[in-house]
Image: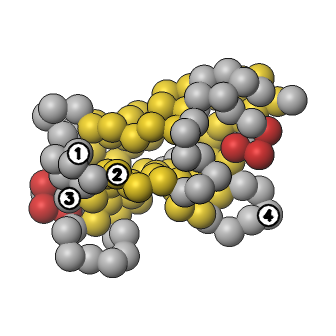
Amino acid sequence: QVRLVESGGGLVQAGDSLRLSCAASGFTSSMYFVGWFRQASGKEREFVATINWDSSSTRYADSVKGRFTISRDNAKTTVFLQMNNLKPEDTAVYYCASRPRFNQEYPHWGQGTQVTVSS
């Protein structure tokens, strides 16, 4: 069993920064990859960023490259999403999710945290 809890969302102005946290607990094999996804109101959920177990590999959506940074603490129990130069179009509920190394799908999800960026 894996439990993921997001925190750090809030209301900010365009150009501001936020750091989201995803606290993970459970089977470490199920947390090899941890990803951040977001879903804006009325839109489908989209991929934001992902990181592997030892932080040697990260990947980002084109829309956030150069602005967002995903990282993982040394204990590998918390994954962060540093979001800089936020834009109104970044407004969404942000979810973290985890999957085992050779899964293509993310079976474990957190409850989400709201990020609202005002113009």
**Picture quarter containing residue 71?**
top left
The kind of residue tagged 1 is Ser
Q: Earlier in the sequence, mark 4 or mark 3?
A: 3
- List x then y, in percent, for residue 114: 63, 40
Alpha carbon separation for disc pair 1 and 4: 33 Å
Q: What secondary structure is found at the residue carrying circle 2?
A: strand
Do callouts 3 and 1 mark residues in contact (Cβ within 8 Å)? Answer: no
Looking at the image, residue 12 lies above or below residue 106: above
- Count of picture labels: 4
> What residue is at 55 percent from the left and 46 percent from the top?
65
Callout 1: 10 Å neighbours few (<14), some, many (20+)?
some
The kind of residue tagged 4 is Gly
Q: Earlier in the sequence, mark 3 or mark 1?
A: 3
Front position in the image: 56 or 48: 56
The disc at residue 30 is none
Alpha carbon separation for disc pair 2 and 4: 28 Å
Alpha carbon separation for disc pair 2 and 3: 12 Å
Query: In the figure, is residue 89 to the left or right of 106?
Result: right
Residue corresponding to mark 2 = 58
Residue corresponding to mark 1 = 55
Do callouts 1 and 2 mark residues in contact (Cβ within 8 Å)? Answer: yes
